[in-house]
Image (cartoon, rainbow, N blue to C red):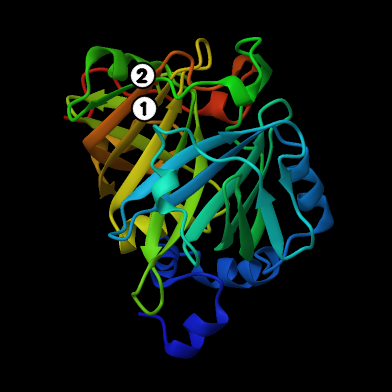
């Protein structure tokens, strides 16, 4: 356990520190985190967010179930009036659980990602305003992410109708993965994962959302479980640290061909030393989602689609699940 003085001076919570210690990077990552993770957004990040047409948001309900969401708007729908605030002029469609989680002082994780150039920045914060058109977030943590495992995509409109005319889409809710869901997961090269950890006083949950990428087929699907290799990254272990503190997750998959969305929720099992991981080149460990709930939104739930132009060079160096040794 971290001492009180160590915890108060660190930008990381206890779960993140525990994972960093387990893999032997705690000392160097602690110092890097103090300079890389800010309590304000640099101007470069503020301008980046303002140029986006889509934004990923992670939230949670009052019991700590993470919810991943994707919001859309014309360039400028995200703005930053000052380094300590981010304003989002967009609300989720009726199928999205984010709407029920938008309450004053609630925590949200924000991921800005530009799939046309592989740039991404993160901002986690607290809701300070919610109205009929959007919400405002006060910065708690702001930091950049490297472009590893992000595939360059050609983003184009999925339809000619304006964003404000889009309907809520056709929603299917189910508990067990069906063939269509498994097929999308198996061929996905990108997904997004929402996670959260109890706040220091235990009264709420601090939220985060992150990108995951690999070669198509990098996710293993067996029954109602999916297993994801954990590749080398910045060693902050924000997601895995949240899993240690609160072993639940929400995953969002996008069908970039037709614009449908698949959202999964479930419990997390961390796989530190399982033999099949050793056969997956580039994987240092893995984690498994035991799916408990799923929602599929059809009728082109998102207004943008994105064919891959170039796969991430780093992702192409990774391996594949060994035949006959897939997780059971």
| Outermost residue to the front | 132
Q: Residue at x 81, y 47 (%)?
A: 47
Labels 1 and 2: the sequence-earlier one: 2
Of residue 194 and residue 203, the one placed in the foreground of this image is 203
Of residue 25 and residue 197, the one placed in the foreground of this image is 197
Of residue 269 and residue 86, the one placed in the foreground of this image is 86
- Count neighbours of disc 2 (C-alpha within 10 A) and say few if under 14, some if 14 to 19, many if 20 or more: some
Give the labeled residue for mark 1: 219
Occupied quadrant, residue 124: bottom right
How far is mark 1 from mark 2, CA to CA? 6 Å
Q: Is mark 1 on a helix, strand or loop?
A: loop
Give the labeled residue for mark 2: 186
State whether residue 197 is above or below residue 46.
Answer: below
State whether residue 167 is above or below residue 207.
Answer: above
Q: Is mark 2 on a helix, strand or loop?
A: helix
- The picture places residue 247, in percent across and down from the top left corner, at 28, 54
- The picture places residue 23, in percent across and down from the top left corner, at 42, 60
Mark 1 and mark 2 in contact? Answer it, CB < 8 Å. yes
Q: Residue at x 33, y 14 (%)?
A: 183
- The picture places residue 190, in percent across and down from the top left corner, at 50, 28
Q: Residue at x 19, y 29 (%)?
A: 224
Can residue 22 be spotted in the picture? no
């Amino acid at each position: 356990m971290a001492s009180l003085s160590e915890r108060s001076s660190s930008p990381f919570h206890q779960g993140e520190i525990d994972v960093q210690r387990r893999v032997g990077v705690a000392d160097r990552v602690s110092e890097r985190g103090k300079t890389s993770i800010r309590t304000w957004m640099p101007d470069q990040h503020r301008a980046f967010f303002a140029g986006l047409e889509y934004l990923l948001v992670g939230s949670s309900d009052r019991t700590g179930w993470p919810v991943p969401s994707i919001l859309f708007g014309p360039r400028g729908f995200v703005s930053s009036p000052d380094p300590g605030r981010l304003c989002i002029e967009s609300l989720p469609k009726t199928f999205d659980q984010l709407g029920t989680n938008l309450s004053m002082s609630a925590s949200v994780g924000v991921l800005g990602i530009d799939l046309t150039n592989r740039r991404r920045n993160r901002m986690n914060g607290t809701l300070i305003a919610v109205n009929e058109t959007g919400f405002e977030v006060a910065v708690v943590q702001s930091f950049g992410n490297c472009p590893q495992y992000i595939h360059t995509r050609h983003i184009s409109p999925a339809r000619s109708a304006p964003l404000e005319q889009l309907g809520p889409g056709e929603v299917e809710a189910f508990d067990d993965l069906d063939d269509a869901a498994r097929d999308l997961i198996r061929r996905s090269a990108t997904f997004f994962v929402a996670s959260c950890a109890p706040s220091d006083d235990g009264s709420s949950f601090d939220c985060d959302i992150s990108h995951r990428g690999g070669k198509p087929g990098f996710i293993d699907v067996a029954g109602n479980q999916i297993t994801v290799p954990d590749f080398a990254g910045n060693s902050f272990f924000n997601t895995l640290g949240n899993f240690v503190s609160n072993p639940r997750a929400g995953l969002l998959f996008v069908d970039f061909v037709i614009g449908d969305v698949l959202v999964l929720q479930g419990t997390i099992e961390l796989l530190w030393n399982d033999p099949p991981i050793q056969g997956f080149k580039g994987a240092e460990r893995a984690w498994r989602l035991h799916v408990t709930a799923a929602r599929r939104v059809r009728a082109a739930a998102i207004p943008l689609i994105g064919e891959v132009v170039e796969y991430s060079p780093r992702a192409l160096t990774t391996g594949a699940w060994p035949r006959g040794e897939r997780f059971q």
